[in-house]
Image: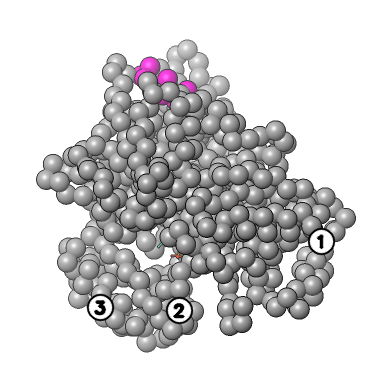
Amino acid sequence: PDNVRVSYGTAGFRGNASGMEYVFFRMGMLAALRSKLKEAAIGVMVTASHNPEHDNGVKLIDPQGEMLAQSWESLATALANVTNDQLIEQLKQIIDSQKIPLSNTSFSFYCKRLQVSNEVVCNKTTFANASAFGATCHDHGLLTTPQLHYILACYNGGDIKVDEEHYYQNYASAFKALLNVVSLCKLNPVTSPVTVDCANGVGAAKLTKLAERIGANIIDIVVYNDGQSGKLNENCGADYVKVQQRAPAGLNMEPFHRYASFDGDADRLIYYTLDSDCNFILLDGDKIAALFATYIRDNLKKVNIEKNSVSASINLRLGIIQTAYANGNSTNFLINQQNIEIACTPTGVKYLHEKALTFDIGVYFEANGHGTVSFSLFYLKRLQKGESAFDPNKSAEERFAAKKLKLFLDIINQTVGDAMCDLLAVEAILQDKNWSVKEWYRIYTELPNRQAKVQVADRRIIETGDAERKVILPSMLQPAIDELVRKYPSGRSFVRPSGTEDVVRVYAEANTQENADDLAQQVSLAVY
Ligand code: NG1
Ligand code: ZN
């Protein structure tokens, strides 16, 4: 349409579903071209993640299950924005500039979003058009986003028969194997139910299947918001719970029970509970990252891989990658109390993932619950050596720690943040540590914080630097924010244009909730 410009943002294209047909149409073409170039299958995921039901979106997935290469984001944006008259010319430009061998075969995998009125049109358009471009298309129907990443990576890795069932079998057996080792180390393994709000999205049916494969005697998962009565992402789901800092509508919570929420496409996970005074307690991506990293680090210490290795001089690097949204107290806890290396990147999983790969073990989470762990080949080799270097003289504790690290790695979906795998990983760690949610949330206390949105004429005039922690343009804005922040003890605030919504996001934290709310409001006014 005239005067409409879309861009391939933090998570592909997003917008009102009714106006997106041409974007789907063109992404079908682009997927086919990219597949020819990479000589591998490319994924096309149709989802608007945590956004309301009337929205839709589309993103491409690269062969190993990673996000579309950044250099192609601008090609996607250019292709989506040309007029029909310019379309052929634009395609020719892409083919020439990227030297795409048109004679190569191409494959696209795609799967679609649940409960979108024009879903069928969007999907048929993408599908038909990729086919017209010579791609062989595999329709995987409804999947969570991480399931498509997983299936695509397995397929391109040579397992051409991979399907959804393969995903469940893989993670269910990894989880059971880890719990087996965990319960061998203890006399009384604790099991208590976890209630999971699936945001009325695709995750409900998928989690039910995964839980069935594991068995109710091993994990007790109660699915809430399964899509039977409520609307997708409406007053529920990980984003709602995180931003509103309250339970999904209608959920009657009990103190110290474990609750979790997925978002609509099940790539985000957060936990929450009530304390004994019925205060709402959130355990977000920062707390999940802290749990994972300290678990890995503590087991590494027990295994003492370095001692057992051939070249003991090389250290394994463990790092946590955060964004500016990470709570200040989580960063303090990890650096000062746990002595774990921290890196900060701009918002968007692609940046965190890229940074994570620079560590041997990179634990990355956005505060909103999107994250996973990446393990280097070097770490894998060390782990194998650590395991095989064990002789009968080694303690049982050492042997178990090595085994646990290996099995923990197996329940992680390394291609992308995966709510189901992350849930299994949290549940396994809590069981191993004999922790209830209480011990977990007490590892550190979050600074009170607030997120707000400001509608402005053109959010793109805001430019940020220093991993989005500072505003560069307009030049008067950062000094104004600094001045406001100075007024509040433990104050911190930053603003950035959203990559998925037409708003400027404001984040503030301070010593009290009142101050955090106040600071967010003052900064919002400064932006406005
Ligand atoms: P934007 O709209 O760019 O803030 C949001 C999330 C990102 C990421 C993307 C993709 C926040 C503050 N931002 O991006 O972390 O998850 O959506 O879904 O949560
Ligand atoms: Zn999502």
Q: Where is residue 343 in the image (x, y as percent from the top left)?
A: 44, 57
Q: Mark 1 points at which residue?
A: 100
The residue tagged 3 is 522
What's the CA distance linking mark 1 and mark 3? 51 Å
Where residue 325 sits: x, y (%)? 37, 61
Hey, what amino acid is under mark 1? Answer: Ile
In the drawing, does residue 331 fall left or right of residue 127? Answer: left
Which region of the structure is painted magenta? 177-185
Magenta span includes 35: no
Q: Identify the element where label 1 is drawn.
A: loop
Mark 2 closeness class: few <14, some 14–19, many ≥20 residues within 10 Å = some
Badge 2 amino acid? Arg
Please state, as top left, top right, bottom left or bottom right, where the C terminus lies in the image.
bottom left
Position of residue 390 measured from the top left corner of the image (x, y, whole percent): 50, 19
Q: Locate the N terminus and report the quarter of the image it occupies.
A: bottom right
Estimate the x, y position of residue 57 in percent, counting from the top left. 55, 61
When the figure is inspected, residue 373 is found, relative to residue 470, above or below; the finding is above
Residue drawn at (38%, 77%), measured in percent from left and top?
Answer: 455
Q: Does the residue labelled 3 lie within 8 Å of ligand 1?
A: no
Asked whether the beta carbons under mark 1 and mark 3 sit within 8 Å of each other, the answer is no
